[in-house]
Amino acid sequence: MIIDKLRLDGKFGIVTGASRGLGRSMAIGLAEAGADLAIISRGLPDLMEVAKEIEKIGRKVLPINADISNLKQANDMVDKVVTEFGKIDILVNNAGTTIRMKVEDFTEEAWDKVMAVNLKGAFFCAQAVGKVMIKQMSGKIINTASLLSAIGVPNAVAYAATKGGIAQITKCMAVEWAKYNINVNAIAPGYFRTPLTKPLQDDPIRSSQILSRIPMQRWGDPDDLKGIVVFLASEASNYVTGQIIFVDGGWMAG
Ligand SMILES: NC(=O)c1ccc[n+]([C@@H]2O[C@H](COP(=O)([O-])OP(=O)(O)OC[C@H]3O[C@@H](n4cnc5c(N)ncnc54)[C@H](OP(=O)(O)O)[C@@H]3O)[C@@H](O)[C@H]2O)c1
């Protein structure tokens, strides 16, 4: 039965950036579908709250404090998960950040910060988990792209560069790792209400410009990602790889 293929009972996953926003909702969605999870962020208090929510669902949870832009911390985090769980079936490579500045004002420091988390951090997390999955000959990697993998908007040049890069990393990994039975896809969210987009939500002009471009006439709710993340983490998506799936209320269709 197809509905059984969507279940994640007995699966072990990692969700980076799970302490709030999209990562929190995707982690809860995976747990609701049956997965046990390691959840990652730099700040512990919010992460522990998410851990409690996952425990209430009845799943095992391992909260880990790590900065994924630091290669050693990212590798240590993956080692810890393997030691604890014995395998990794799912990686939701979600931790991300942005710094808003005009192109002409963008500084080297700001550029490096955004690259370090969104591109380098995400790549090396996937590489570390991928090595485990290659040995297992199975796995599901779900990267977090963006509308800005495909389009440009003001004040987001470094962020857009990283998300364009994530789309390409997703395709390269998918092609190289298909023979190991590893699916690599990316979810590309449109505009979602999270702490990351708070400055845009609070800017009446930018906020109404954004809303006017969304055919569904609303911002995304983080829970809108639960369905797609469960699908991509599950056996129901076994023949889907290398895809950048926009979840954007119709923006890219307009
Ligand atoms: N919200 C949107 O509309 C939207 C649209 C498209 C794509 N996205 C992407 O979706 C992802 C999540 O975004 P969001 O809106 O949920 O952002 P958010 O609310 O700011 O949450 C970001 C999460 O990432 C963690 N994080 C940030 N830097 C980290 C690091 N160096 N190491 C470990 N964890 C780190 C944060 O926790 P700590 O700060 O405690 O570490 C937090 O848990 C990002 O990749 C973002 O680019 C978001």
Image (cartoon, rainbow, N blue to C red):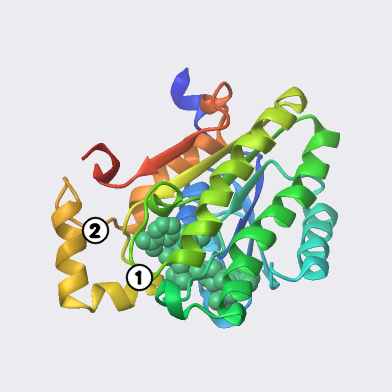
Please tell me whether residue 47 is drawn above or below residue 123 in the rendered image.
Answer: below
Residue at 74%, 56% (x, y): give it: 124
Q: Quick one: label 1, few (<14), some, or many (20+) residues within 10 Å?
A: some
Horizontal and vertical percent position of residue 195:
39, 74
Q: Earlier in the sequence, mark 1 or mark 2?
A: 1
**Residue 38 circle label:** none
Horizontal and vertical percent position of residue 199:
31, 78
Per the image, label 2 sits on a secondary structure element best described as loop
**Residue 219 circle label:** 2
Please tell me whether residue 199 is drawn above or below residue 247 in the rendered image.
Answer: below
Query: Looking at mark 1, is its residue's CB closer than 8 Å to ligand 1?
Result: yes
Q: Nearer the viewer, residue 157 or 30?
A: 157
Count of labels shown? Answer: 2
Asked whether disc 1 touches disc 2, contact meaning CB atoms under 8 Å apart, the reply is yes
Amino acid bearing label 2? Trp
Which of the image's four quarters has the C terminus? top left
Residue at 57%, 32% (x, y): give it: 242
Image quadrant in which you'd find residue 250:
top left
Distance (Cα) linking label 1 and label 2 = 11 Å
Query: Looking at mark 2, is its residue's CB closer than 8 Å to ligand 1?
Result: yes
Residue at 47%, 59% (x, y): give it: 160
Q: Nearer the viewer, residue 103 or 191?
A: 103
What residue would you read off at disc 1? 197
Please tell me whether residue 41 is drawn above or below residue 133 in the rendered image.
Answer: below
Q: In the visual, does 138 lie left or right of 4?
A: right
State whether residue 82 appears in this view: yes
Amino acid bearing label 1? Thr
Horizontal and vertical percent position of residue 2:
46, 20
